[in-house]
Image (cartoon, helix red, strand yellow):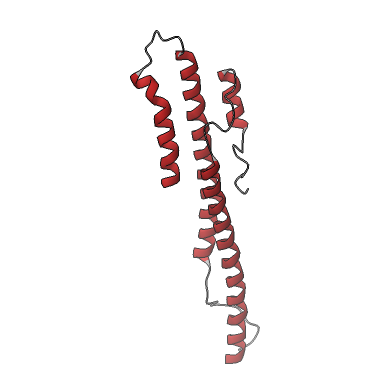
Amino acid sequence: LQLAHEHLDSLYRKLQPGVHTLTWGSMNLDAYLHRIRYSVASLSDLCERVGRAADEKVDGNMRTVRGARLLEVGVPLPRSFTVDDFVRTQRDHVARQVRVVARCSGEAEETLQAIVTQMRLFTMESRSPPTDHAHHTHHMRGSRALTAAPLPS
C-alpha cells in the first residue's frame, strides 16, 4: 500500500495547480490537462498490469497450492498392498506435491517481487507525454512496460 500511496501523492501534487492556481481562462490550461490525462492514464495502466499479474500469477498459483493434497487416498492398486507399499506410495505422492507447492510459491514470490520492483521504479514522468490525446490513448493501451522491469508473463 505504501508504494501505491507514493504514486497517488504524486498525482495529487500534479493536480494542485488546477485546484489553486489555474482558471478556465489560463493560458496553460491545455498543457495542464494534457499532463493530468497522461499521468492518470500511466497510473491506470500500471494498476491494470499489477492487478492482472496478481490475479493470474499469484492467485492462480495459490489456488494450486490450496488444492494440493498431502495424503493420497483412494488410489486404485492392482492388488492389496502392504504398509510398506502404502508408505512408499504416500512418500512419492508427498514428494510430487512438495515440488508443485515449491514451484507455485516460487512463481508467486517472483511475481510479487516484480510487482514491488515495478511499483518502485514507476514514475509518471518516466517518459515524455505524447503530443496528441488519440496517440496517447492508443499508446497507453498497447504498452505493456512503463519501466525497465516488466512483470513476468
At x 63%, y 82%, the residue is 77
Q: Is 49 placed above or below 77 here?
A: above
Res 32 seen here: yes
Q: Is 6 placed above or below 18 here?
A: below
Q: How many marks?
A: 0
In the image, farthest residue toward the right: 78
At x 38%, y 20%, the residue is 18
Q: Quadrant of residue 143?
A: top right
Between 126 and 111, which is closer to the camera in this rendering? 126
Q: Is 114 placed above or below 68 here?
A: above
66 vs 127, left or right, is left
At x 48%, y 14%, the residue is 30
Residue 91: x and y, percent? 59, 81
Q: Is 7 placed above or below 152 here?
A: above
Res 82 seen here: no
Residue 67: x and y, percent? 51, 65
Q: Quadrant of residue 7?
A: top left
Between 82 and 46, which is closer to the camera in this rendering? 46
In the image, farthest residue toward the top: 25
Residue 124: x and y, percent? 52, 32
At x 37%, y 12%, the residue is 23
In the image, farthest residue toward the left: 20
Residue 123: x and y, percent? 52, 36
